Amino acid sequence: MTQGEKTFKNLDFILLDLLCVAASFFSAFFGYHYIKQHLIADFDMYNGAYRIVVSLIFLIHLFYAFSGDIYSDILRRNSVEEVRGIVWHNIKLLGTILIVLFFLKESATYSRLILAIFFVLNIFLMTFFRLIRKHHLLKAKSSSAIHNSKLLIVCDREHADELCRLLEPKAYSGYELAGTADAASYLDYIKSNVVDEVLVSYSDEKTRGKIIETLLDVGLTVHIDIGQFFDEAPNSRMNNINDRSVITTAINPMTFRQKFIKRTIDIVGAVFGLLITAVLFIFFAPIILIQSPGPIIFKQKRVGKNGRIFNFYKFRSMYPDAEERKKALMSQNKMEGLMFKMDNDPRIFPFGRFLRKTSLDEFPQFWNVLKGDMSLVGTRPPTLDEYEKYSLYHASRLSIKPGITGLWQISGRSDITNFEDVVKLDREYIRNFSTFEDLRIMLKTVTVVFTGRGSV
């Protein structure tokens, strides 16, 4: 896990500490003036001088939070180590503030007692709330690992127990051992289980190289046990998994910055999308009910990143018995391969055709995006029966989160009738991922939707 990813995972502690800093200083400032002078103070006193110190406290705290190791292994530390780290952080914070004020020749303006109260109060609040947060996370960790990456170890059978012991999941490490497999069984294991990343530990260069090449083609992130570096591994970098040094390679590993920007855009886009969805629901619900009595929102199990199953939502555009009627219509499937599309599908009611033509049926998927099951841009999630027929090559299109739109949608949508072409486009998107490309696809999607090009 990179330093940026570790920082992102500790963002909750950083924000919690920031709230403690704010509460401590405001309590010290207002409490001091109320108790000593019996007045309700404000920051306009002293010609607004305390506005400077507030800004300094926030900036210096964030500087040490992001540049130091205050949050390193935070869930592995015991209470004594935690208090020691918090005290040291506050000593650096207060010391830096006093030094800056001294050089600004402003130190005489401020009450040292207020800063001392802030120092003590901040240590207490940070300790109290950090310990509560740690207890909550550790408790949640023991009952659910849904947000952890599923790590498969591929090695000789005689080394499996030793590697499992060395790589035993640690609290809040971000990894959960999915299992172990050898060179003969790892493909079958990946096909039937959720696997996000694979650690390869083979001394034989030929076997190791073949496994890595296959895993990269599938689209999984591969970690190579240190000392077994494969010279031809693309995009390789040093990494660490639960204190085990590895070399990491992938088809196109996103940087922390790219992941953060992509998720931020997803959340902002999902919030706006859901507001529009709520308005559309008011108008669409009566029409759907009149033309086809039944649920307004269609819910279906779909397959997401690396085989994860999730509930997929759309405005219902088909009659309620559409799934049962699908088998009888398979002979009219216009797609070559593992997808189903047909012209003039009789399962779609009249208003449903309008919804599909305009892609307005897709709006409830913004809820999937907000939940984290999907992204705004990605690959389309297959149904369970489609996924069961996938080869590992096809499954590589699910090495990222599925999306509401993607390269396939802007490249012809339903005009592309060969599933292998869809997979090719999806793999092209994954290999060449960039934030700019996501923005281009979103803008192009708007054009495609308004023109109706390639829609069913």
Image (tube, rainbow, N blue to C red):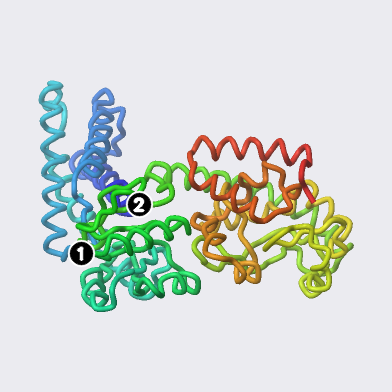
- Packing grade of label 2 (10 A; few <14, some 14-19, many >=20) is many
Q: Which mark is residue 76?
A: 1
Answer with left or right where residue 311 lies relative to residue 324. Answer: left
Q: Residue at x 61, y 59 (%)?
A: 381
Up/down of 172 relative to 424, above or below: below
Picture quadrant where residue 62 is located: top left
**Which sits in the foreground, 281 or 122?**
281
Answer with left or right where residue 57 lies relative to residue 411. Answer: left
Q: How many marks?
A: 2
Q: Residue at x 49, y 57 (%)?
A: 399
Query: Where residue 195 sits: x, y (%)?
Result: 43, 66
Q: Which mark is residue 249?
A: 2
Residue 122 visible to the viewer: yes
Q: Do tag 1 and tag 2 residues touch (Cβ < 8 Å)?
A: no
Up/down of 307 relative to 221, above or below: below
Query: Where residue 411 sits: x, y (%)?
Result: 68, 42
**What amino acid type should be assigned to the residue bearing mark 2?**
Thr
Q: Residue at x 28, y 36 (%)?
A: 41
Query: Where residue 349 sits: x, y (%)?
Result: 87, 61
Q: Which tag, 1 or 2, sits closer to the chain's start? A: 1
Picture quadrant where residue 34 is located: top left
Q: Residue at x 39, y 74 (%)?
A: 184
Up/down of 296 relative to 89, above or below: below
Picture quadrant where residue 136 is located: bottom left
**Which sits in the foreground, 327 or 148?**
327
